[in-house]
Every structure is written in C-alpha cells, then in structure tokens.
C-alpha cells in the first residue's frame, strides 16, 4: 500500500525533484518505508511505499523487461503469482517478487487490456518512455483513490488531495456544487472533488495522457441480471462458499503480519472465520467498543473470538479519545467527510497497526449481499399511498427523541421525512443529512444564487439511470449504493483511516468474482421478503452461531447526538453563534441556531445535520490555517 503521484512538466530536473519532494512529504503517512522517483524530460513520477511484498527488493518505480515502461503502483494484485507464471512461460524474467513488476510486464505484453486480468485493489501510473505517454488506472470498485488536475498543459495526479495541493501550479477554488452534494450525501461524490479544478478518477476507469491530449475510458462495469439460476439453495451456498474462501485465501498473501477487524457482526465474523481456518497460526483480531451500550458490540466480538479461538484485542472508544482524535481527523481530511464512523475506524486502524501491518475487513457486505434496511424501506414505501405521507410524518414526529444508536424514533422520522421524494432521491436522503426541504429552509440567498442547479443530485443520477438498465426494483438502489455510498463513503473512510496509520486493509467481499456472482443471482437470494443478506446468512449458519447470524444490524456509529449535548456542546455553540463561520456563507444563522437549540432541547435529533456542519467548519478552518 502506497501513495503515488506525478506530473507532466518541462521544468528542469532540480525543480522537478523539489516538487516531487514536496508532494511526497504530504503522502509520507501512506508509505513510510521507501521513497522513489522517476524523472525524464516530460514527466516526474513519485512513490511513498508501504512494504508488504518483497520487503527488501520491491522498491518502486519498477521497469518492464524491455525498459520501455515504468510504473508506480498503490494497492495489491492478489493473483499476481498466477499471472507471473504465465508471463514466465512467455519468456519474461523478474528481479522482484512483487505484484508491481507483474503489472508493468503484463502491460508490456497486453497494453491497457492487462486491467481485465488483475484481481485486486489498485491505482497505478505507467509511463511509456518511447511514446511519452502516461496511463493512470483505477480498480473495478475504486478501493484505492486517485485524484487528478488537468489545466493549461499541466497534468498532475496523486493518491490524495493534499499531494495535488503541494504542486505550485494546482489551483483550488471551492466548488459550490460539491458543497451542495456534500450537505446531502455527507461526502463529495466522484468524479467531483471539493475543488472545481480537481477531479477523482472514477472506479473502473483509466486516463491516457499523450501530447497534452487526455482521454478517459471506462474499462469495467457490471449489471444486475439474474442469469445464474441454480437447482436449489445448497448450490447457491456452495458456490458462494467457494468464492469467499478463494478470495480470503488470495488476500492472505503477505510478507508482514496479518489480522482482521472483528466487530462481532455477520460480515466481519465470516471473514475472520475463513481466515482463521486458512492461516497456519493463531489469528489476531481487533475491535473498538463504546461506553454507550446502544452503540457497543464488545460482547459479540469477544464471543466470536472465543468461538474461533483468535487472539483478540479490544478497546473502548471514550469521549476522551474523541477529544484527542479530532485534530488528527481534521488534518487528514482532504475534503469534508461527515460519516462519523471515520473516527472509530481511525482509532481501530491505529490500534491494529500496533500488532499487524495488514488487516482484512468485512466492508462491502451490505452493498454486495443486500444488507441495508433501506432496501426493505423502499419495498414498504412503494406500497404506501401518497396521500398518507404527510400524516405518517406527523405521527413519527410525535415520538419522543432518543439519542441511542438507530433508535425507533430516529428510524421512523428518517423514513417518513423522505416519503414525499422520488425513490432515487429519497434513498440518498435516508442515508444522508440535508434534504431538499432542509436546504430550502436554511440556505441563504447568496448561496442559492451561486448554485448552478436547484438539485445537483440530478447531475449524478443522469449517468446512474443510463448505466442501470432496469430501475423498477430495489436492486437499483443497491447499485446506487455500490456507485456512491460504498465508493465515496465506506471505501474512502477505510482508506484514509488506515493509511493515516500506515495500515493496509484488504476487503475480500469486493473480489470481483463475488460481486459479479451476487449481481447475477435472483434478487430474492439477496433480500427475501424481510430477510436481508439472505444467501450470506444461509452460508453463515454453516460456520457461526445462529444468534450471531440473525442478530439485528448495528453499524459502526458513535454517540454524536449525546456528545453534542455534552463534550462537543461548547465547540458546536462557538461555531453556530459565530456569524463569521464558514457555514454562514451557506446557511442563515437563524436556521443553524434553530437546529442546534432544538437538538439541545431534545425537540429533534439533529445529529446528522449538526455533524455535517461541524465537519465542514472544521475542514475549512484546517484548510485555511
């Protein structure tokens, strides 16, 4: 796992080295083990390496056999040994035991078509020394990040925004469209970034840059078509069993210690189960718990650890931890990102890094197997006559406010407040923060006039509707989550939290063979009636206690609602009461004060709205300091 970066340039070599050094300094946390570079007349490439494979000889950049191509690579190709054997049969030789050298030689043989053979998470840049052509590419599901800037014949790329900002020619103007989407989605969706001049390369895409011409192409896509019809449930279970076992087995390949995140839920417990069976020694597992019992899963995590006989490490995330952690969170937050589970994920990564360098996680399970309660919510919502929407919202608002995790009143109010919207919009409002009504009530006139659209969600959904051919059932929203929530929230959270602590996290459920298999099975094998993750739960019963498989989903939330009324109250008040706060370039002070006071008085649970504003303000303060 690494940080990669580079830029096209006609500057002298001394200046190129200086800029590479500045960018590399910003990305050092991603790769503390080695810095490397390649410079010629037209390009400068850099790498900050976290050594996982071939610790002594695997330094980058690496050249192809014919010395025509040079690569910098972030990520892991799990089937690299199999590809390497095939290349050796064709006469290729290798000086390292790394997946990076395999990629560049496969590119020498097949060009950009090499992408289809790679099973893994990756972002890489390959430079053709003879043709002066650069290709940057991203993995199928966007597990590894890649940002780029292209303006006035300057092309710059980096694993993180802070790397791009270290280049003297990169300009950064905050995008109002991005701010508007962040306020709804709690993240800035790809291909946008928070800055107008910078973009993210989409998952399953590559860019080629030659003679100041830039061309972007999609190299991977999948669809939800039920074209795998097997005889009975056992056949579906056996196929999934084989695919997960194979995926975990591939992701065991490492020259450094390996462990797992173990929450005690179905997803992480299954991954831990498979790895504990395959690993020749006792597995180390890691968990973060909470003082507030409605958020805590410590007992489940310990129970599974005992059941699977792992060496278990567990720590309670306290309010003091929050206070100590926030400065690190703001300094590592390139863009505003208000999924509060970033905080415990950061602490979990920090804690895990003390024992291992690689951890497997259960991320992707909800999106791949159909685990979110929103999918059931759509089934229910589609049966409710529109005439009842306002009445149901009125009834839900009569429930007393509770600050517990996923309390009944929170779920009912989140559900009913979005019934009035079209399904594709309400799905984002269920998951996110500010809906159309909140914005109409709160945006100030200046910000409304600066926005190019009254609803920038439509900008995203035009492409989504084109890609998904059938959008009349709940699986459309599963695809929606894969494209946005998984890609721009869950994977960003894991990448930033883990790489800030120089930890590599691998995600077995996002093996493309598993994703494509689950996309092809009938929809009732994913979400049957009211049973989420139907097929995964059938498999789980083979290996795990039944009550673990069937227990309600808890998520990785933290008690933000409670903390805004206690340890974060003064900080929040300072932001809301200060009319010079950045958020008041967007919102009317009377509106922000109202939602804060209603939360303090427990008239409304405004945790999501307030946390989204709190993060935005702190992001801006860190950016300008």
Image: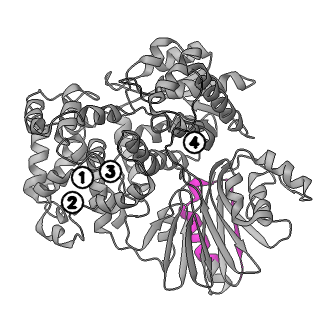
Q: Which residue is mark 2?
A: 583
Q: Quadrant of the C terminus?
A: bottom left
The residue at which mark 1 appears reads as 613
Q: Quadrant of residue 255?
A: top right
Q: Position of residue 495 (x, y in %)?
A: 52, 48
Q: Does label 1 or label 2 sit earlier along the sequence?
A: 2
Tell which tag, 2 or 3, sits nearer the viewer: 3
**Residue 20 is inside the magenta segment:** yes
First in residue order: circle 2 vs circle 3: 3
Circle 4 or circle 2, nearest the eye? 4
| Disc number placed over residue 516 in the picture, else none | 4
Mark 3 neighbour density, 10 Å: few (under 14) some (14–19) many (20 or more): many
Secondary structure state at the residue bearing disc 1: helix
Residue assigned mark 3 = 186
Residue 397 image position (x, y, % from top left): 10, 33
Residue occupying image coordinates x 43% and y 51%: 469
Magenta segment: 17-40
Residue mark closest to the camera, 1 vs 3: 3
- The residues bearing labels 4 and 1 have C-alpha atoms spaced at a distance of 37 Å
Q: Earlier in the sequence, mark 1 or mark 3?
A: 3
């Amino acid at each position: 796992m690494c940080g990669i970066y580079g830029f096209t340039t006609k500057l002298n070599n001394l200046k190129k080295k200086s800029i590479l050094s500045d960018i590399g300094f910003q990305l050092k946390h991603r790769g503390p083990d080695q810095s490397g570079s390649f410079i010629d007349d037209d390009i400068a490439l850099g790498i900050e390496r976290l050594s996982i494979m071939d610790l002594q000889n695997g330094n980058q950049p690496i050249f192809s056999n014919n010395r025509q191509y040079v690569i910098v690579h972030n990520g892991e190709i799990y089937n690299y040994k199999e590809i390497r054997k095939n290349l050796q049969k064709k006469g290729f030789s290798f000086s390292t035991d790394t997946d990076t050298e395999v990629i560049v030689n496969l590119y020498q043989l097949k060009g950009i078509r090499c992408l289809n053979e790679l099973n893994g998470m990756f972002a890489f840049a390959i430079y053709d020394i003879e043709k002066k052509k650069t290709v940057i590419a991203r993995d199928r599901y966007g597990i590894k990040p890649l940002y780029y800037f292209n303006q006035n014949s300057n092309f710059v790329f980096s694993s993180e925004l802070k790397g791009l900002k270290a280049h003297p020619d990169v300009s950064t103007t905050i995008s109002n469209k991005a701010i508007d989407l962040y306020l709804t989605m709690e993240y800035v969706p790809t291909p946008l970034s928070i800055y107008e001049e910078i973009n993210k390369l989409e998952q399953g895409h590559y860019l080629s840059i030659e003679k100041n011409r830039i061309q972007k192409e999609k190299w991977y896509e999948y669809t939800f078509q039920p074209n795998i019809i097997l005889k009975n449930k056992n056949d579906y279970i056996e196929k999934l069993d084989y695919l997960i076992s194979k995926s975990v087995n591939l992701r065991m390949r490492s020259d450094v210690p390996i462990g797992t995140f173990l929450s005690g839920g179905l997803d992480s417990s299954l991954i831990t189960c498979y790895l504990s069976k395959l690993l020749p020694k006792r597995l180390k597992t890691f968990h973060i718990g909470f003082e507030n019992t409605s958020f805590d899963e410590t007992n489940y995590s310990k129970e599974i650890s005992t059941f699977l006989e792992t060496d278990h490490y567990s720590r309670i995330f306290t309010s003091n931890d929050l206070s100590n952690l926030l400065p690190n969170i703001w300094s590592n937050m390139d863009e505003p990102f208000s999924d509060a589970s970033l905080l415990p994920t950061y602490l979990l990564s920090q804690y895990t890094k003390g024992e291992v360098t690689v951890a497997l996680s259960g991320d992707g399970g909800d999106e791949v197997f159909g685990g979110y309660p929103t999918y059931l919510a759509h089934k229910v919502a589609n049966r409710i006559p529109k005439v009842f929407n306002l009445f149901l919202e009125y009834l839900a608002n009569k429930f007393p406010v509770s600050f517990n995790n996923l309390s009944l009143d929170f779920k009912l109010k989140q559900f009913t407040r979005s019934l009035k919207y079209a399904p594709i919009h309400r799905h984002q409002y269920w998951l996110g923060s500010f809906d159309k009504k909140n914005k109409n009530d709160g945006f100030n006139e200046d910000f409304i006039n600066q926005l190019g659209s009254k609803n920038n969600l439509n900008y995203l959904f035009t492409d989504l509707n084109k890609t998904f051919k059938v959008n009349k059932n709940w699986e459309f929203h599963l695809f929606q989550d894969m494209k946005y929530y998984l890609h721009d929230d869950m994977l960003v959270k894991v990448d930033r939290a883990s790489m800030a602590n120089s930890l590599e996290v691998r995600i077995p459920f996002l093996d493309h063979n598993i994703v494509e298999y689950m996309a092809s099975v009938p929809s009732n094998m994913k979400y049957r009636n009211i049973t989420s993750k139907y097929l995964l739960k059938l498999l789980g019963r083979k290996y795990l206690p039944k009550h673990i498989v069937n227990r309600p989903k808890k998520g990785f939330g933290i008690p933000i609602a409670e903390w805004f009324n206690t340890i974060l109250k003064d900080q929040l008040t300072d932001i809301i009461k200060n009319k010079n706060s950045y958020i008041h370039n967007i919102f009317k002070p009377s509106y922000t004060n109202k939602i804060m006071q209603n939360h303090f008085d427990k008239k409304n649970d405004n945790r999501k709205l307030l946390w989204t504003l709190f993060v935005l303000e702190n992001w801006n303060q860190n950016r300008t300091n």
